[in-house]
Amino acid sequence: MAGKTFYLETLGCRANQYDSEVLRRYLLGSGYREVDHPGEADVVIVNSCVVTHKAERDVRKLLNRARREARPETRVILTGCMVPLRRRVPADFQGTLGEVLDHLKARHPLPAFRQKRARAILKIQEGCSFRCAYCIVPRVRGPARSRPLDQVLQEARDLVAAGFQEIVITGIQVGGWGRDLGYRLADLFRQILALSPRLRLRLSSILPHYLTPDLLDFWASEPRMARHFHLPLQSGSARILRAMRRPYTLEQFENLVWAIHERMPNAGIGTDLIAGFPGETEADFEETYRFVERLPFTYLHVFEFSPREGTEAAELPNPVPPPVRKARVRRLIALGEAKRRAFLEQQVGRVEEVLVEQQRNNGHVRGTTGNYLRVLIPGAWETGRLVKVRLREVRESRVLLAEPLEPAGPLS
C-alpha cells in the first residue's frame, strides 16, 4: 500500500476532528500520502455531521463531488454521525470510526502518533445521555461513556512527547467524564498538566451543572488552564428552555457566568444560541436577547433552528416562519459582534500567551490566546509554540496585533 493517497474531509465538532486525526494518523503511518483534492486520491473519507439540515446537505455534496471527480478505482468511505441514520449516500463503504479503521487496517497496525500540528485534540468521552428536544446526537453517538483514565493519560503523554504545548479536551458530554468511573474532571486535568510545565489545557465546552465549585476553584488557581469557557445556553427564555428539555435553569446559568467573570475577569466566555425554536414568540426572543445582552459573553455562536427527523422538536406545533428565524439570527449575530469588539478593546495592553497556529506571508504569524482571542505577532515563530506577548491594537478583522515579549527560537 506504500505510496497510495488519501483525501479526508471533516465536518462538525471537535469530536469529529479528533476522530479524523485518528484516521489521518493511521493512514500516514501506513504509507499513505494526503492530497488536497479528491480527484488525486486512492481513498476518499468523509467524516460526517448531521446536527443540522445544512450539515447533512454538505455531507451529500462532498460525497457527490468525490464520486464525480474521483478516479473509477477510488474508494469512497463515509464515517461519522450520518452512518447510524442509514441514509442512502454514494459511498463504497459506511461505518463507525472503529469499523472504518478495521476496514483500512486489515493488514496494518495502528502506528504511533507522530504528526505535528499547532494544537492537539484529546477526546476523553463519547456519547450523550441527555434528551434535548432538538438534538439528534444521542441517537447517532449513543449514551455517555467515559474513556478509561489510563487510556486518556497515555494518549496525553504521547501528545506531550510529540511536542504539543496546548491540548484541547473534547467529547460530546465532556463535563460528565469520570462520573461512571469514580473520578472527577479536575483530577484528570491535574494529572495531564503534571506531564509538562509548558502545557496549556483548553476545554471545548461544558454544560453549566458540570462546572462544579471545586472544578471552578481549580480552574481559577491554575494558570495553565485556558481562561476560556464555552457554555451552551440555546435560549434565554425560561419557557423555551424548558421546552428544549435543557438540564439547567436560567438562574443556574446566570449565576455560573457571573461567578466565572468575578473569579477570572478576563476569561473568554462564549455560548451557543438557537433562534426560532418551535413556539418561540417575539416575547420569548426578546427575553433571550435581554438575557444574553446583560451577561459578560465575549462571543456568540448563533444557529437557526433546524428540525431533525427523529427528534421531539421536529414534531412540535407552531413552527417559526423561516424569515422570522433568519431575522432573529441576524439580531443575535450583531449582538455577538458588539460584545466581541468590546472585549477585544478591553484586552489592549494585557500580557497573554499565544499559541502560534498559522504562518502568514505578511511578516506575521497568527495564533490564539488562552481566553480565545485571535492575535497577529510580527516575526517568524514556530507553529505550536506558546509565545508571551503584549496586546497592542485591535484590527478591523477582529484580531489583535501583539508585541512579542520574548526572543524567537525553538520550542522549549
Image (spheres, grey):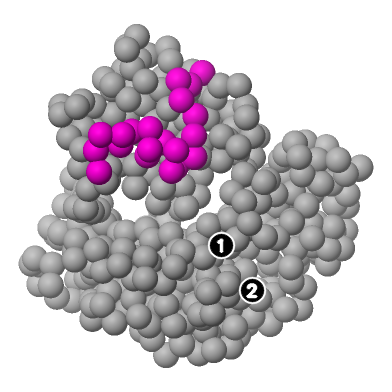
Given residues 241 and 121, the one toward you in this image is 121
SS for tag 2?
Answer: helix
Disc 1 marks a residue whose amino acid type is Arg
Residue 161 lies, in percent from the top left, at 19, 66
Q: Quadrant of residue 197?
A: bottom left
The disc at residue 72 is none
Q: Is residue 346 left or right of residue 230?
A: left
SS for tag 1?
Answer: strand
Q: Residue at x 85, y 52 (%)?
A: 280
Mark 1 or mark 2: name the one nearer the start of the chain.
Answer: 1
Q: Residues within 10 Å of mark 2 (few under 14, many from 20)?
A: many
Q: Is residue 215 magenta?
A: no
Q: Residue at x 75, y 36 (%)?
A: 309
Q: Is residue 317 above or below residue 120?
A: above
1 or 2: mark nearer the eye: 1
Q: Residue at x 56, y 62 (%)?
A: 145
Disc 1 to disc 2, C-alpha distance: 19 Å
Residue that label 2 marks: 208
> Which residues, given as a range, are shown in magenta?
90-109
The disc at residue 145 is 1
Q: Quadrant of residue 50?
A: top right
Q: Is residue 10 left or right of residue 262?
A: left
Q: Is residue 4 above or below residue 122?
A: above
Q: Residue at x 26, y 63 (%)?
A: 159
